[in-house]
Image (tube, rainbow, N blue to C red):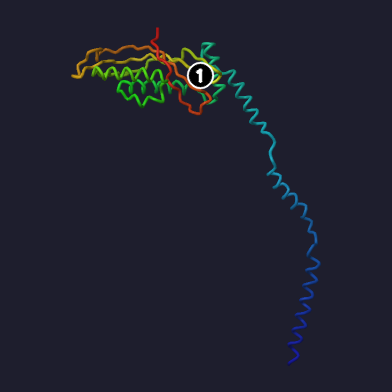
């Protein structure tokens, strides 16, 4: 009975030797899939290689230039060429967006000028226009008069001139034909100028200016002239 444990140990030893021999035969043996693994790894690494210059973006740039040369911005050839030049310098420039913005600026500037909110117009006006508005408001305050301007409607808005100066400063002149009621009151509230029941047809040329190299997309009002 005492010899049985030794037999068990002997059997276990033989099994261990058998397993070791099998491992020696298997370890280091090629399976035939090594090349596939290498290729897959190489493909993964190749995806991180520095790409060549993007020919697609170059094609798009060329396409944009071609489209710009064919695009029509205005029926007047001279104005059309100038607006094309502006668009070439600023690809985000849009006639529709500009006209929409000009209308909003027209209403906002007149409203705040009438209400004497001159500081709110500082970033929208050239220094000359700002100083003119400020002087007019101070003169009315001195005389204790109030100007009331109500825009009834903007009947027409059209670009009548455009130019680019020094290769980066753009000027666009817009004619605004609007219906307005303009009255001036004294301290008692009596109307001393104008008629609250009279609607005036006002035609003015507003010239907007913008440095196209400036990141700020907003245009400022540079000059105001009465339309002939």
Q: At which x and y percent is residue 72?
A: 54, 16
Residue 228's place in the image compared with 94, above or below, is above
Which residue occupies the foreground of this view, 194 or 166?
Answer: 166
Q: Residue at x 31, y 23 (%)?
A: 116
Is 29 positioned to the left or the right of 66 in the image?
A: right
Which residue occupies the foreground of this view, 68 or 135?
Answer: 135
Is 158 positioned to the left or the right of 16 in the image?
A: left
Which residue occupies the foreground of this view, 177 or 121?
Answer: 121
Q: At which x and y percent is residue 108?
A: 36, 23
Which residue occupies the foreground of this view, 20 or 118?
Answer: 118
Farthest left residue in view: 188
Callout 1: SS: strand
Farthest top residue in view: 228
Name the residue tied to disc 1: 170
Q: At which x and y percent is residue 177?
A: 38, 13
Q: Name the quarter where the C terminus is drawn.
A: top left
Q: Residue at x 78, y 65 (%)?
A: 27
Is 74 positioned to the left or the right of 8 in the image?
A: left
Q: Residue at x 75, y 49 (%)?
A: 39
């Amino acid at each position: 009975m005492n010899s049985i444990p030794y037999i068990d140990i002997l059997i276990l030893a033989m099994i261990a030797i058998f397993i070791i021999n099998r491992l020696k035969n298997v370890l280091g043996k090629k399976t035939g899939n090594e090349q596939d693994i290498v290729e897959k790894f190489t493909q993964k690494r190749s995806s991180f290689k520095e790409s060549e210059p993007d020919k697609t973006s170059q094609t798009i740039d060329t396409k944009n230039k071609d489209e710009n040369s064919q695009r029509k911005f205005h029926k007047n050839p001279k104005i059309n060429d100038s607006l094309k030049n502006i668009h070439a310098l600023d690809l985000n420039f849009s006639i529709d967006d500009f006209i929409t913005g000009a209308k909003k600026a027209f209403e906002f500037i007149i409203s705040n000028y009438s209400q004497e909110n001159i500081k709110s117009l500082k970033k929208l006006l050239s220094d000359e226009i700002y100083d003119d508005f400020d002087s007019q408001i101070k003169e009315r305050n001195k005389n204790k008069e109030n100007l009331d301007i109500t825009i009834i409607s903007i009947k027409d808005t059209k670009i009548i001139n455009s130019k680019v100066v020094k290769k980066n400063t753009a000027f666009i002149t817009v004619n605004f034909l609007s219906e307005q009621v303009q009255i001036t009151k004294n301290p008692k509230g009596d109307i001393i100028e104008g008629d609250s029941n009279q609607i005036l047809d006002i035609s003015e040329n507003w010239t907007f200016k913008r440095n196209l190299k400036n990141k700020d997309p907003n245009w400022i009002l540079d000059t105001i002239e009465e339309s002939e």
